[in-house]
Image: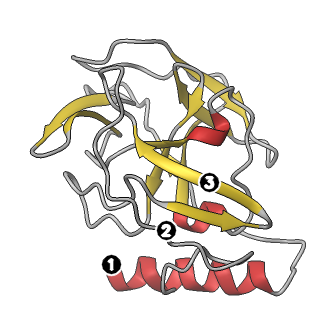
Amino acid sequence: MKALIALLVGAALVLSACGSSKSSSPTTTASSSGGTSSTVSARNVSGTGTILVDAKGDTLYSPAEEANGKILCTGGCTAVWVPLTVAAGTTPSAGAGVSGKLGVVKRPDGKHQVTWKGGPLYTFAQDGGPGDVMGNGATDKFSGMSFTWHVAMTGSAPAPAPSTSTSSGSGGGGYGY
């Protein structure tokens, strides 16, 4: 499964780099099928603190540059930073431990992305699964726009993160896809 995801992400980045006007961006879609899972929940991760996770338990991130809810991560960026989306008309639900307002913002591609305290939420394609926070503190650049990513924390202070840059120009952020 992990190899398939890496292959799909790599293909999306190649298409993005080729300047294709038609691209397929992966999204993490939150289910609201009446089950007990919440769109966003809180989880304690050793060494990081209590963070927000999606219905699968994957870490949620938000870039500092989108704090006002304006979507800047588009195209090839969404192959690495996967938007957490819901179906149109769906209200995202908060699990235990999630304080702060969940909302929805319409993306340029028409999808509806979940926000928390006004910041759009994303998962990181290189996280291996629940509890991974590999994208915390990452900096990168897509289509000339620089981003600094942090895990979405239930507290007010961001989690400590290594100060590493993954930037490699205007393409895929140097993620090795």
Q: Nearer the viewer, residue 30 or 72?
A: 72
Q: What type is the residue that disc 2 sits on? A: Ser
Q: Secondary structure at mark 2?
A: loop
Q: Which labelled disc corresponds to residue 147? A: 3
Dot 3 crowding, Cα within 10 Å, few <14, some 14–19, many 20+: many
What residue is drawn where x is 68% and y is 26%? 68
- Colouring method of the image: secondary structure
Assess disc 1: are there few (<14), some (14-19) or many (≥20) residues with their C-alpha within 10 Å of its C-alpha: few
Measuring from the top left, give residue 11's x and y in whole percent. 62, 85
**Residue at the extreme left:** 46
Circle 3: residue type: Phe
Quarter of the image where one finds residue 64: top right
Label count reads 3
Residue highlighted by disc 1: 2
Foreground: disc 2 or disc 3: 2
Q: Residue furthest front?
A: 163
What residue is disc 2 on?
165
Is residue 54 rendered to the left or right of residue 6? Answer: left
